[in-house]
Image (tube, rainbow, N blue to C red):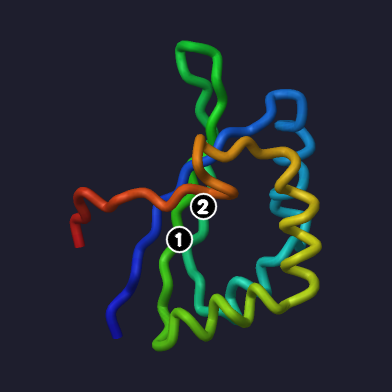
Amino acid sequence: MEVLRFGMVIGIREDRLDEYRALHADDHPGVRDLLSAANIRNFSIFFERLPDGSSYLFGYYEYHGSDFEADMAYLDAEPRNREWIEMTAPMQIPLPGEKAWKVMEEVYHNG
C-alpha cells in the first residue's frame, strides 16, 4: 500500500488563535478517532507568523488506506466532523480563491 502525503496551508485569525490551540490541545478529543477511522495518520498542524504580520497554519497528514475517496466521503458525512469544521472554519482565513485549506504541491520527500 502506498502512503499518500498531504501538506496544506490556511490563514488563521489572530484573535482566535488561542481558541484554535485549545481545540487542538492533547486533552481535547476533537475528531482524532474519526481521522484514524478514515486511515489518516501523523496529522500535524504548525503555526507561523510571517514578517508582514499575517499568520498561517500548515497542516500535514498521511493517508494509509486503500480507498481515499471512500474514506473522505465517510469523513464528509460524519456529523461530528461537520460540527468540527463548522466550529473551526470561522477561525481560519482561506487563501484567495480557496474555500478551506489549500492542498500544497509536494516538492520533495526523503522516504
According to the picture, the residue beneath numbered tag 2 turns out to be 44
Q: Residue 43 in the image: x percent, y percent?
A: 51, 59
The amino acid on which the numbered mark 2 sits, given as a three-letter code, is Ser
**For this view, does 87 lie left or right of residue 44?**
right
Name the secondary structure under disc 1.
strand
- Vertical comparison of 3 with 104: above or below: below
**For this view, does 84 lie left or right of residue 60?**
right
**The quarter of the displayed image where residue 22 is located:** top right
Say which residue appears at 45% left-offset and 60% top-offset.
61
According to the picture, the residue beneath numbered tag 1 turns out to be 61
Name the secondary structure under disc 2.
strand
**The quarter of the displayed image where residue 54 is located:** top right
| Residues at marks 1 and 2 touching, judged by CB atoms closer than 8 Å | yes
Question: How far is the residue under mark 1 from the one under mark 2?
Answer: 6 Å
Q: Residue furthest front?
A: 97
Give the camera-side residue of 90 and 109: 90
In the rendered image, the quadrant that contains the N terminus is bottom left
Give the camera-side residue of 18 and 7: 7
Q: Residue 25 in the image: x percent, y percent?
A: 71, 48
